[in-house]
Image (cartoon, rainbow, N blue to C red):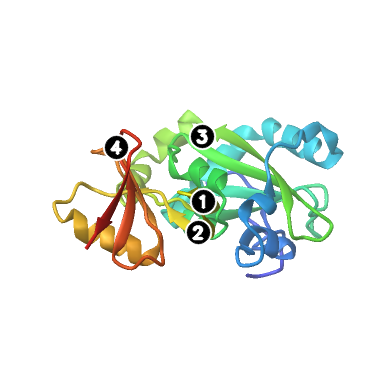
Amino acid sequence: MESRPARNHTQDFADFIESNGAAISPVAKAFFGRKERMAKDRFYWMFPPDKDRRVASLLAWIQSVSNGLGSFGLHKFLQTRERGALIVNANFQPSESPNEPAFDWLTYPELQKTMDRTLQESVAFYDPSALVVVFVFLPSKSGKSLAIWRRKIAVPSNVRLAYQAQITQAIDSLKRDYEIHVDEYVTLAGLNFDRLTFVTGYLPLNPNLPTLLQRNASGGSCGYLREHLLLYICIPFLCGTCISLGPLGIFDVVSF
């Protein structure tokens, strides 16, 4: 990622500074250090925003420029043709304009790498033609964790109408389902499984269900079948065996 902030000069859209990764690089371990620390130890969502002047003033500024920021976020979606969010570091001041924040756009595949459920769910299920998701974060002194807040900004209706054709094309190109990658502790039948990686996505109804389960079991993932309302929790090192939780909460062992 580049380290020099740059101003966005896209015609017909509001003008905001982009950090091109400079605001995120100092806290890369907090965002993407999944091999060192779990997401719950890197992202803190419950801190009150009014406890820090930088955060409170930035959130107020975002609200005051919401129309422009909404059109800017729509532009980033159309540019990348992928769901994403605007990210802004409350402790970062771009050298060319220290009184303005600098934004970064992280797409959904990039947010998956954080392993944080809230980040991913916020972006996986919003309507990119109507809303822009904005995350404001304040890093710790070590840079290994951060406090973070979420805001949703409406896209101005006149901008939506002006770019309706492009919006329709971009939405049609999106994936139908989005997997949520998390790292969590699981206790099952008295056994502790530490730092499992789950994939809580939507699998289409498929008559070849044993093959799907076997693939999940070998990869240590978790699939949710919307049509049957069945949750399958697959233990990664039990080859050829998948422990499943049915709609009545009864555990079964499925072998292949």
Q: How many discs mark residues in the rendered view?
A: 4
Q: Does residue 186 show up? A: yes
Residue drawn 63% across the image and 33% down it: 66
Foreground mark, 2 or 3, reads 2
Cα–Cα span, label 2 and label 3: 38 Å
Dot 3 or dot 4, earlier in sequence: 3
Q: Place residue 69 in its image quadrant.
A: top right
Foreground mark, 4 or 1, reads 1
Are the residues at dot 2 and dot 1 in contact (C-beta closer than 8 Å)?
A: yes
Residue drawn 26% across the image and 55% down it: 254
Residue drawn 37% across the image and 49% down it: 201
Are the residues at dot 2 and dot 3 in contact (C-beta closer than 8 Å)?
A: no
Dot 3 or dot 1, earlier in sequence: 3
Considering the image in quadrants, where does the N terminus appear?
bottom right
- Percent across and percent down for residue 84 are 50, 50
Dot 2 or dot 3, earlier in sequence: 3
- Percent across and percent down for residue 68 are 61, 38
Marker disc for residue 229: 4
Dot 2 or dot 4, earlier in sequence: 2
- Circle 1 residue: 186
The residue lying toward the viewer, choosing from 11 and 153, is: 153
Tag 1: residue type? Answer: Val
Cα–Cα span, label 3 and label 1: 40 Å
Marker disc for residue 90: none
Dot 4 or dot 1, earlier in sequence: 1
SS at badge 2: strand
- Circle 3 residue: 155
- Percent across and percent down for residue 46 are 70, 36
- Circle 2 residue: 196
Tag 2: residue type? Answer: Leu
SS at badge 1: strand
Cα–Cα span, label 3 and label 4: 34 Å
